[in-house]
Amino acid sequence: MSRHPPLIVKIAPDLSNEERADIASVITEHEIDGLTVANTTVARPKGLRDPKANEEGGLSGAPLFPMAIKMVEDMYKRTEGRVPIIGSGGIASGADAYAMIRAGASLVQLYTALVFGGPSLIPKIKHDLAFLLAKDGFKSVNNAVGTNVRMVE
């Protein structure tokens, strides 16, 4: 039997509780290979100071991080940690990447921070992430995935 090409589903942080439950069910039922959480948001968190903050369209970068990390935790719980999650949204440091991993992400994706921070951001994040993993006694990223999430029994 031949294996299908990998399929990763990307979701936005603006989904309702019911939509997240449906997606988690479909992903686990149909053995989807992974989930990218979260895409841009149409929400506008309080405290945005940019003059363009109220423009329509998807918001990315640092303001998305709190929403994205909650979505990663939620989808990790809903899939019972059985589906690899790519954490995306506002990751700009090793500490952000580490928090996303502990929330349930197996991988992290950078975009906005890379645009503003440039390629030198990557080795800095890798260095800081390695430091944080070692500091907490983890031998690898895999050992840290989802450690902040309590599974519902």
Image (cartoon, rainbow, N blue to C red):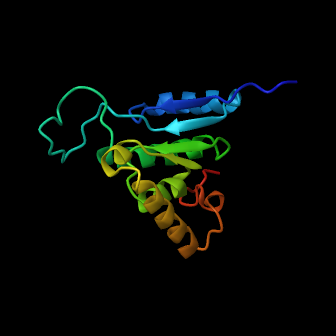
In terms of depth relative to the viewer, which is nearer, 29 or 152?
Answer: 29
Q: How many marks?
A: 0
Spot occupied by residue 137 in the image (x, y as percentages of width and height): 61, 74
Q: Judge left or right: residue 14 versus residue 59.
A: right
In this orientation, which residue lies closer to the viewer: 92 or 149? 92
Q: Quadrant of residue 86?
A: top right
- Residue at (54, 32) in percent of width and height: 21
| Residue 8 horizontal/vertical position (percent) | 59, 31
- Where residue 2 sits in the image (x, y, percent)? 84, 24
Q: Is residue 95 left or right of residue 50?
A: right
Residue at left offset 42%, top offset 31%? 15
Seen from the viewer's position, the closer of residues 42 and 19 is 42
Residue 84 figure quarter: top right
Residue at image location 38% in from the left, 47% down from the top: 114
Furthest residue toward left: 51
Residue 144 position (above or below residue 18): below
The one of 135 and 23 positioned closer to us in this rendering: 135
Question: Residue lying furthest front in this view?
Answer: 119
Please give the name of the residue rendered at 65% of the width and 41% of the height, measured from the top-left corner.
83
Residue that lies at the very extreme toward the right in this rendered image: 1
Q: Quadrant of the N terminus?
A: top right
Q: Is residue 122 left or right of residue 141?
A: left
Coordinates of residue 111 in the picture (x, y in percent): 40, 42
